[in-house]
Amino acid sequence: MNITDITKLIALVLAISIAGERLVTFLKTIIPPLADPSPNDPVQESTTKKIVLMLLSFLACWITACFLHGKFLVDPIDIGGSIGKVSVYLLGLMAMGGSAFWRGILGYTKAVQQIKVQQFRHEKVKADLALNTQLSAAWHTAALTELRREKRKSFAKKS
C-alpha cells in the first residue's frame, strides 16, 4: 500500500470526522438534554446519553460520507490507488472514532515515516559502501599501475 493512498484515506476520514462532529454539536444545541448533564441518576443517564451520542455520531458521519459520495445508499466510495473502494459504513465508523482513533492513526503514520527514514538511511549506507568499495578498488588499481611503472623504470635504468 502506497503512503499517498493512506494519506488520501486519512484526509477523507478526517474531513468526514470534522463534519460529523459539527453536525453532532449542532444536534446537541438543538436538543439540550444531550448536552446538559441531568441531576437525576447520573450513571444511567450518562450511559444512555453516551450510546445516543455515539449513534448520532455514526449517523452524522455516515450521512456526510454519503453526501461526499453523491449517493445516499450503501455503495462503496472509490478512493483510488491500491486502497480501491471503501464502504460508506466503514468510513462512518472510522470517522466517528474520535480522538482515540486519531491518536492511533497518528502513531501509525509516525511509525511509517520512521520506517521510511530508516529505509532511506539504509539505502544511503549501502550506496556509500558500494561507492567506497569502487573507490578503494580504483585506488588499488591506480596504486598497482603506478608501482608497475616504477618497477619498469627502475628495470629500464638497470639495463
Image (cartoon, rainbow, N blue to C red):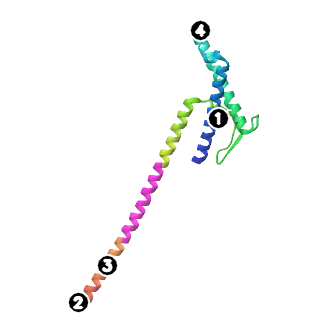
The first of marks 4 and 1 along the sequence is: 1
Q: Which residue is mark 2?
A: 158
Give the mark nearest the N terminus, 2 or 1. Answer: 1
Q: Residues within 10 Å of mark 2 (few under 14, many from 20)?
A: few
The residue carrying mark 4 is 41
Q: Residue at x 38, y 68 (%)?
A: 135
Indicate the position of residue 60 as horizontal and vertical percent values: 68, 28
Magenta segment, which residues? 117-138
Say what secondary structure mark 2 lies in: helix
Q: In 3D space, how far apart are the residues under numbered discs 1 and 3 (Cα atoms)?
A: 71 Å
Three-letter amino acid code of the residue under disc 1: Ile
Q: Which residue sits at x=28%, y=82%?
A: 150
Residue 43 as seen in the image, left or right of residue 158: right
Q: Are marks 2 and 1 in contact (CB under 8 Å)?
A: no
Q: Which mark is residue 16?
A: 1
SS for callout 4? loop
Q: Badge 1, how many Cα within 10 Å: few under 14, some, many 20+? A: many
| Residue occupied by mark 3 | 146
Quadrant containing the C terminus is: bottom left
Residue 135 lies in magenta, yes or no?
A: yes
Asked whether residue 124 appears in the rendered view, the answer is yes
Say what amino acid the circle numbered 3 marks: Glu
Badge 3 density bin: few <14, some 14–19, many ≥20, Cα 10 Å: few
Q: Secondary structure at mark 3?
A: helix
Q: Is residue 84 left or right of residue 142?
A: right
For the residue marked with disc 2, what is the amino acid? Lys
Q: Residue furthest bottom?
A: 159
User: Which mark lies nearer to you, 2 or 4?
Assistant: 4
Q: Callout 4, which amino acid?
A: Asp
Q: Are marks 3 and 4 in contact (CB under 8 Å)?
A: no
Query: Residue 1, can we see it?
Result: no
Who's the residue at 66% across and 32% down the image? 92
